[in-house]
Amino acid sequence: MYNPGEEIIQIVDRNNLETEILPRRIMRQQGLIHRAAYILVFNEQGELFLQKRTATKDLYPSCWDVAAGGVVLAGESYEESAARELVEELGVTAAFSHLFDQYFEEADNRVWGRIFSCIHNGPFQLQKEEVEAGSFMNIKDIFELSKKEEFTPDGIDILRKVSQ
């Protein structure tokens, strides 16, 4: 059985320089800085695919997320991670563009993220272990929903930057 806690993760420092590789569970336990790929999936109408994370996720369980994506594995580039995560989470491939890189930090999450965007209208094959549900929404409605329901803080931070 697949255990995400045993994935081998690239650990980095505050300058995004590689320091060591460790299992994901150790990275989470120690709050180590790591890398992640974030893919904003828009449809041709400019709506963003919003997904609800499962209750079993190790970080931000049951929160809404504005991006597909995840932790970059050891030996993997941001781009390889983004392509892998699109297939795993949404069951699709798509050409994506690099938007920007950012460092995000809060108590349980310290991450260097590379943010990408792509256009895909679906249909999607949601990964049942990670994505409970999803649908396209316009960005204004996503911000309204974020006032009432929990969102991943790194995701909503990215959306604020993208929509400026």
Image (cartoon, helix red, strand yellow):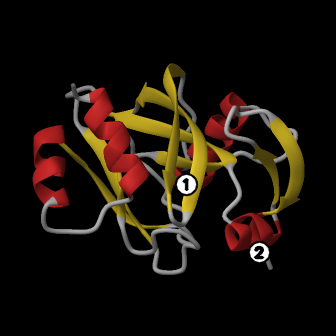
Q: Please give the residue where the numbered disc 2 appears in the rendered image.
A: 3
Above or below, 69 against 44 in this view is below
All told, the count of numbered labels is 2
Q: Please give the residue where the numbered disc 1 appears in the rendered image.
A: 89
Quadrant location of residue 24? bottom right
The residue at 44%/50% (across/down) is: 124
Above or below, 134 against 55 in this view is above
Q: CA distance from mark 1 to mark 2?
A: 16 Å
Position of the C terminus, as image quadrant, is top left
From the viewer's side, name the closer residue of 37 and 93.
Answer: 37
Residue 39 placement, left or right of 156: right
Residue 85 position within the rendered picture, expressed as x and y whole percent measured from the top left: 62, 46
Q: Kindly indicate whether the residue at mark 2 contacts the one at mark 1 (C-beta within 8 angstroms).
A: no
Q: How many other residues sit within 10 Å of disc 1, few (<14), some (14-19) or many (≥20)?
A: many
Residue 4 placement, left or right of 137: right
Position of the N terminus, as image quadrant, is bottom right
Dot 1 or dot 2: first in sequence order is 2
Residue 44 placement, left or right of 140: right
Q: Which mark is residue 53?
A: none
Q: Amino acid at mark 1?
A: Glu
Quadrant location of residue 109? bottom right
Tell me if I can see residue 138 in this picture: no
